[in-house]
Amino acid sequence: MASTSMDHIVCVEHHFDAPASRIFAACSDPAQLAQWAWGSLGRLQRAEADFRVGGSFLAETTRPDGAVWSFEGTYTAIEPEARIAHTLVWHAPMGYPAVPEHLEIAIADDASGSTLELTHTGLPDQRSADGHREGWRNVLETLEEFLRRSS
């Protein structure tokens, strides 16, 4: 029997050659966010953000078949150059009904750049957690490529 609890969590860590301030800017500026938020699935991307606690954001991409996928949320915590947390609602075929999800990233400078820790909570089952883990890894690799291209 499949689990119906929302206690599945994804944690992903990624090291960047860039400082935390640069990662934070890429996460908080809609023009930059649009360049990497959908990872390798991104095409004709767009993002909007009212970057403040209680503000909302939207990131969307147009798929090769013309379908528009998006995700949105409301910022629940912001600590400049260190932490961003928000709710997460998908408007894309996720393989499960809409559930209350939450994403938090923590960024810290280290000796050779910075480390980002991403935590995604509220997932309905292990299968969706495994899929999101791979997806977030792809997104963070895309962010890394974006940072290299834009430096």
Image (tube, grey):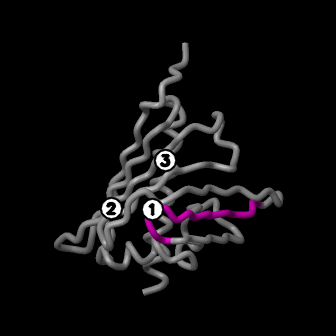
Regarding mark 1 in the picture, which secondary structure is present there?
Answer: helix
Residue farthest toward the front in the current orientation of the protein: 54
- The residue drawn where x is 69% and y is 48% is 92
Look at the image and tell me in which quarter the C terminus lies. bottom left
Count of all numbered marks drawn on residues in the image: 3
Q: Taking 103 as reference, is 144 above or below it?
A: below
Query: Is 92 one of the magenta-colored residues?
Result: no
Regarding mark 2 in the picture, which secondary structure is present there?
Answer: strand
Query: Is 62 one of the magenta-colored residues?
Result: yes
Q: Sequence-wise, which precedes: disc 1 or disc 2?
A: 2
Mark 1 vs 2: CB contact within 8 A: yes
Identify residue type, mark 1: Leu
Q: Taking 102 as reference, is 16 above or below it?
A: below
Regarding mark 3 in the picture, which secondary structure is present there?
Answer: helix
Cα separation between marks 1 and 2: 9 Å
- x and y, in percent, of residue 75 in the image: 47, 60
Circle number at residue 134: 3
> Crowding near pointer 2: few (<14 within 10 Å), some, many (20+)?
many
Identify residue type, mark 2: Leu
- x and y, in percent, of residue 59 in the image: 62, 64
Residue located beneath label 1 in the image: 140
The residue lying toward the viewer, choosing from 127 and 100, is 100
Residue located beneath label 2 in the image: 116
Cα separation between marks 3 and 1: 10 Å
Q: Which residues are magenta?
A: 51-63
- x and y, in percent, of residue 44 in the image: 71, 71
- The residue drawn where x is 52% and y is 31% is 124
> Crowding near pointer 3: few (<14 within 10 Å), some, many (20+)?
few
